[in-house]
Image (tube, helix red, strand yellow):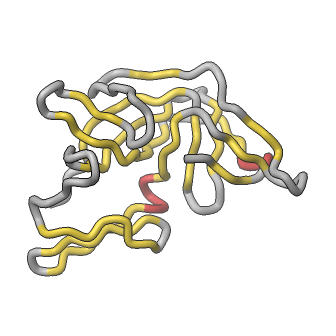
Amino acid sequence: MCWIGEKSDKRIAKKDVKVFKILYWDERNACYHPPFYPENYRRGQAYRVSYLGKTSRENGFGLRIDYGFHCYSEHHCLREERLSDMVVKELNGRVIEYYEKGRREFWNYLPAKFVRCIIPVGTTYYENKSGEIVTPTIKIIGDIEYG
């Protein structure tokens, strides 16, 4: 996943910023896995990368970031609707999950989870107009539960 935005999208967290990631839950090893990298994330742990891999876009305008923790603004992006025994989740107006309750397995046979995370105070991060965020530091909190 790469983040696309503008150079002016750079921010510094004045307080802990609530975000979410979409990760796979590995019950046997009690950890989360991201979809594209062989990493393990555990609840309550903070993680950091030293390099975001920033490059200017081909047209000279804007910014592309390939590394770091890619996540989403929790209050700008995530919406859920319950339709009897079906659940529809949207991210930036696009349906990203549509399933029967209890059936949320994807290509790797691990259940996909919306995971609450925190960007710690003082951390530099980038957030584009769609609520997509990339940061070098993130703390994994746990599943976002819906009532």
For residue 94, above or below residue 77:
below
Q: Position of residue 136 (x, y in %)?
A: 58, 28
Asked whether 63 or 120 is in front, the reply is 63
**85 w.r.t. 143: above or below:** below
Furthest-bottom residue in this view: 83
Residue 47: image quadrant is top left
In percent of the image, x 52 and y 35: which residue is there?
69
Q: Residue at 26% across / 74% down in the picture?
A: 81
Horizontal arrangement in the rendering, residue 15 relative to residue 88 (left or right): right
Dividing the picture into quadrants, the one containing residue 53 is top right
How far across and down, in percent of the image, does residue 144 sit? Answer: 26, 49
Q: Nearer the viewer, residue 124 or 93?
A: 93
Horizontally, is 2 left or right of 57 in the view? left
- Residue 140's spot in the image, x, y percent? 35, 31
Q: Please give the name of the residue rendered at 20% of the width and 47% of the height, measured from the top-left corner.
A: 109
Give the farthest residue toward the right: 60
